Image (spheres, helix red, strand yellow):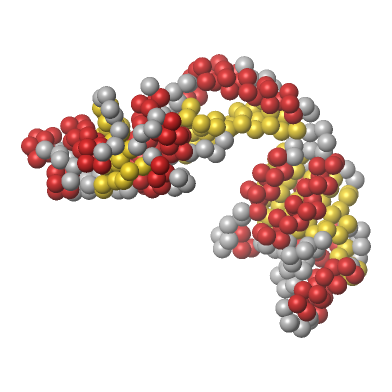
């Protein structure tokens, strides 16, 4: 079953609110084998909704709408749907009773605008909204299902969970979709695509690959479409095994796992702890680490050594090294990693020093250059990276790259 989501409201189009409904709905619908082929946002103009419905019914089996069901004059969805399906408005007694009980419980007097929320097109199946006043509406028109819901997120979610998803699951028994997300780091998108070209070309027609890049990371999403969920899962797992042989070091996890979580599990399994010395990343690595519940089991602490004075006095970086090589150098970042490991008495120490930008760069040390070091019980590894000229992305990429260097050392 293919579906389109239509979000209705000027407030979405002018950026006053963010459309979180569509993302949530798409996730839930995919989980029961329904494929979203389009998401459309339109204004409150009745003509726009009519046009959107006409277009949607040509390409999908299911149309889900949110918004425009409130009690005020700018909420016009119900009137448009009544005309669109050549129906008339009638009062739905259970909804009216629900509205009256809600206002009575709050000690408020019901006015006509509230009572009018119980008016629905006669041809629809009414879906009970237990947390609001506007009911959902289900229309069967030929081979297409149209469903209208309030735009308030918690009302939409209640209707989807209690009323709509169970009905759609019963209808869409055959269609299945299996997703697997593979988290990768360390290979730029174009180079990754080149490495995976032959593997991707050999994928079965019913298994699709998507690249989902973000600063420092690339998620690969495999989506398999068919009728047998068990078989689809087996096929996807087989493809992931092949992928692991092509880019074994680049894959750090699956699903929504973060690299901080992976590093934490590796440190715990080694009965080890890490300490951090940050210069250009300014605490971002520590933030990534402490965003993981229970990170106190493997994270000792951090020093944000932004100035040379702190590098010398707290981390033990040699003033001569700073003078000869500068703060952004292999020698300094190695001493930072080794110094924080020593003063915090941890098995591992990691450090960054670089030019985050947008200013401060030079020909020899341009904006985006970052030195990263990982000091362990046996040795210290160090690498230099040249990211870009965007400060925020440089900090994120440097932080994730540092955690990945630690991950690779722990894997050994």
The reply to whether residue 391 is in sight is no
Which quadrant is the C terminus positioned in?
top left
* On screen, residue 287 above or below 131: above
Q: Is residue 407 left or right of residue 36?
A: left
- Tell me the quarter of the picture where residue 133 sits: bottom right
- Tell me the quarter of the picture where residue 135 sits: bottom right
In the depicted view, which residue is nearer to us: 400 or 62?
A: 400
* On screen, residue 210 above or below 145: above
The reply to whether residue 254 is in sight is yes
In the depicted view, which residue is nearer to us: 25 or 98?
A: 98
Identity of the residue drawn at 61% across and 55% down:
19
Circle count: 0
In the depicted view, which residue is nearer to us: 231 or 35?
A: 231
Which quadrant is the N terminus positioned in?
top right
Q: Is residue 269 left or right of residue 18?
A: left
Q: Where does the image place residue 280, in percent across and percent down from the top left?
A: 27, 44
* On screen, residue 148 above or below 26: below
Identity of the residue drawn at 77% across and 63% down:
130
- Tell me the quarter of the picture where residue 46 sits: bottom right
What residue occupies the far front of the structure in this picture?
Answer: 271
Q: In this view, does 125 lie to the left or right of 113?
A: right
Q: Where does the image place residue 101, in percent across and percent down from the top left?
A: 81, 75
Q: Where does the image place residue 12, in percent across and percent down from the top left?
A: 61, 59
Identity of the residue drawn at 58% across and 23% down:
240
Q: Where does the image place residue 164, in percent across and percent down from the top left?
A: 79, 51
Identity of the residue drawn at 64% across and 27% down:
208
In the depicted view, which residue is nearer to us: 29 or 272?
A: 272
């Amino acid at each position: 079953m293919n579906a389109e989501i239509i979000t209705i409201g000027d407030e979405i189009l002018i950026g006053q609110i963010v459309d979180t409904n569509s993302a949530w709905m798409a996730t839930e619908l995919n989980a029961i084998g329904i494929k979203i082929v389009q998401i459309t946002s339109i204004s409150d103009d009745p003509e726009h909704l009519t046009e959107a419905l006409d277009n949607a019914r040509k390409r999908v089996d299911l149309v889900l709408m949110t918004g425009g069901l409130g009690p005020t004059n700018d909420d016009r969805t119900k009137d448009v749907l009544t005309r669109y399906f050549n129906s008339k408005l009638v009062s739905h007694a259970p909804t009216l009773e629900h509205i009256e009980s809600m206002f009575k419980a709050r000690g408020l007097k019901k006015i006509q605008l509230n009572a009018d929320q119980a008016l629905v097109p006669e041809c629809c199946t009414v879906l009970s909204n237990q947390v609001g006043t506007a009911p959902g509406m289900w229309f069967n028109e030929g081979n297409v299902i149209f469903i209208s819901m309030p735009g308030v997120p918690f009302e939409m979610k209640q209707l989807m969970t209690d009323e709509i998803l169970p009905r759609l699951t019963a209808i869409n028994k055959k269609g299945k979709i299996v997703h697997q997300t593979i988290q990768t780091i360390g290979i730029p998108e174009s180079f990754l695509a080149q490495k995976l070209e032959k593997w991707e070309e050999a994928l079965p027609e019913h298994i699709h690959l998507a690249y989902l890049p973000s600063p420092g990371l690339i998620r690969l999403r495999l989506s398999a479409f068919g009728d047998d969920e068990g078989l689809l899962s087996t096929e996807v797992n087989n493809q992931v095994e092949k992928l692991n042989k092509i880019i074994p070091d680049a894959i750090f996890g699956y699903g929504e796992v973060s690299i901080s979580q992976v590093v934490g599990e590796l440190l715990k399994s080694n009965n080890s702890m890490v300490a951090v010395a940050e210069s250009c990343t300014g605490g971002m690595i520590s933030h990534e680490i402490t965003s993981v519940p229970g990170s106190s089991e493997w994270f000792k602490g951090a020093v944000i050594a932004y100035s040379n004075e702190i590098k010398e006095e707290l981390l033990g970086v040699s003033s001569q090294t700073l003078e000869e090589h500068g703060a952004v150098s292999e020698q300094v970042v190695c001493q930072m990693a080794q110094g924080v490991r020593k003063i915090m008495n941890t098995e591992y120490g990691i450090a960054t020093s670089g030019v985050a930008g947008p200013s401060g760069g030079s020909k020899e040390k341009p904006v985006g250059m970052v030195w990263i070091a990982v000091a362990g019980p046996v040795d210290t590894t160090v690498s230099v990276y040249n990211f870009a000229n965007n400060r925020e992305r440089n900090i994120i990429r440097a932080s994730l790259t540092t955690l990945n260097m630690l991950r690779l050392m722990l894997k050994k």
